Image (cartoon, rainbow, N blue to C red):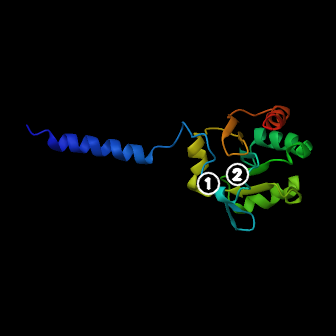
Amino acid sequence: MNHKPFLFFAAFSFVLAGMFKPVCGYSQSIPPFQITLSNNKAFNAKDLPKEKPVIIIYFDPGCEHCQKLMSELFKKIDQFKEAQMVMVTFKPVEELPPFEKLHNTKKYPNIKVGTEGLGFYLRDYYGLMKMPFVALYDKKGNLSWSTKEQPSVDDLAQRLHNLK
């Protein structure tokens, strides 16, 4: 019996599996994401300011835990002025303006709110199954901390402060 076709198929399957599997053990640097802002303009990782901490928050505007996090966060938003905040959802771009209006996000130049749409790059990159998700990166773009649980805003502020 000739095993060459089987071995070729097995090797080819492993290569394909490696190309298409989601990244659950994500790297220690900011992923090369792209989101669409409410004005339909693209914003991506290359647009992030250099030498500034970055907070990525993946959320769903309709999620109860996400709403609670955002409510607490915007009560203490001045504690996050030194960081670039990127708030990402998968919801359609039409759902961004009500969120932005509710939290007056346009008032803060360090906050970008956008959607990754149904491409789910960040959701798959971080291996997310529930929201909210928060990742904190230092000034050099290295992952400092992340959580897949609803974080304490005070804890996040303290972690950001400790990056100095």
Pointers 2 and 1 in contact (C-beta within 8 Å): yes
Relative horizontal placement of residue 25, taking residue 112 as reference (left or right): left
Above or below: residue 50 compared with residue 131: below
- Image coordinates of residue 11 in percent, x first then y, are 27, 42
* Secondary element type, mark 2: strand
How many numbered marks, from 0 up? 2
Between 49 and 157, the residue placed more toward the observer is: 49
Badge 1 amino acid: Phe
Instruction: Tell whether 79 sits left or right of 96.
Output: right
Q: Position of residue 130 (x, y in %)?
A: 65, 38
Where disc 1 sits, the SS reads loop
Residue with the mark numbered 1:
33
Query: Closer to the N terminus: mark 2 or mark 1?
Result: 1
Residue at horizontal 92 percent and vertical 43 percent from the top:
75
Category of crowding for the residue at label 1, using alpha-carbon neighbours closer than 10 angstroms: few (below 14), some (14–19), many (at least 20): few
Labelled disc at residue 88: 2
